[in-house]
Amino acid sequence: MANFEDQPKLLRSLEACKGRNSELRDPHIAPLTTFVEALRTGNTTYDIPYFDPWDGGIEAEVLFLFEAPGPQAKGSGFISRNNPDETAKNFFEFNKDLISRKRTVSWNIVPWYIGNNDGSKIRPANSNDIATGIQPLMTLLKLLPKLRAIVLFGKKAQQGENLIAGLRPKIKLFKSPHPSPQVVNRSPEKKLIIVGVLREVAAYLDQTPNG
């Protein structure tokens, strides 16, 4: 299997995707792989991408929570900052050199793809999507014992704030604009806000004792 450098849009390569798939049973990610496969059981309606093995898996200290998987996550099969889309690229670049990805894991408040079949259009998550998606999130939080912070990216993810605070009150919650080009390009100052939030998270990890 070829070796690949961590870079934006890496998962446009079929070989890179195959490499990630070969790592899904590695110890740090295997419980999350099992979690996703359990969600998929009996569910033929929705596509639910895997967690990225290049992230921290169950060792993660930070959960990055977004809205829903995009078409490229459906294509690659992973929730990943290496997906070949502009949102993933923005997130890769904004977070570069701030927090080691091995300290993080990424997920969506709606864990399944909610676009059309050919991947040409994705609709916004609605209240029913979020109410249903929050249920697996409750299970996920139990699988992340080292979690110390959660970053809620965008208004949809932020609808889970009260539930998360109730389930894991010791976890520090941060709120950030979504890193999609629709947000960042329309309001360039949002980039500075996102990077600022990520810096706050990095400082929190450094200044707060683990455990």
Image: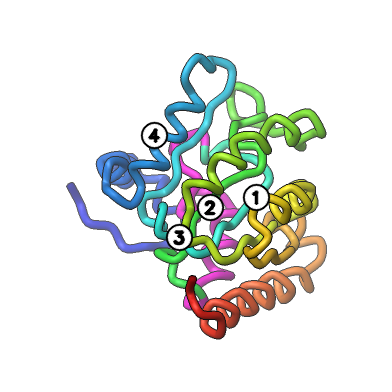
What is the crowding at mark 2: few (fewer than 14 residues within 10 Å), some, or many (at least 20)?
A: many
Reading the image, the residue beneath label 2 is 106
Q: Secondary structure at mark 3?
A: loop
Tag 2's secondary structure? strand
Q: Position of residue 75 (x, y in %)?
A: 48, 34
Q: Secondary structure at mark 4?
A: helix
Q: Earlier in the sequence, mark 1 or mark 3?
A: 3
Q: Residue 24, located in which quarter of the rendered image?
A: top left
Q: Nearer the viewer, residue 84 or 166?
A: 166
Q: Is 71 on the left-hand or right-hand side of 128?
A: left
Give the left or right position of residue 186, taking residue 31 as reference.
right
- Badge 3 density bin: few <14, some 14–19, many ≥20, Cα 10 Å: many
Image coordinates of residue 84 in percent, x first then y, are: 49, 48
The image shows residue 197 at horizontal and vertical percentages of 68, 73
Residue 59 is situated, as x and y percent measured from the top left of the image, at 40, 59
Q: Which residue is found at the position 78% from the left and 52% from the top?
A: 162
Query: Which label sits on residue 34?
Result: 4
Q: Locate residue 102: give its quadrant.
A: bottom left
Crowdedness near tag 1: few (<14), some (14–19) or many (≥20) residues, C-alpha within 10 Å: many
Residue interval drawn in magenta = 74-98
Position of 189 compared to 98: left or right?
right
Residue denoted by label 3: 60
Front label number (2 vs 3)? 3
Q: Is residue 156 left or right of residue 120?
A: right
The amino acid pointed to by label 3 is Ala
Q: Which residue is mark 1?
A: 66
Q: What residue is at 48 percent from the left and 74 percent from the top?
A: 210
Q: Quadrant of residue 124?
A: top right
The amino acid type found where label 1 is placed reads: Phe
| Cα distance between the residues tagged 2 and 1 | 8 Å
Amino acid type, residue under disc 2 in the picture: Ser
Q: Is residue 2 above or below residue 72?
A: below
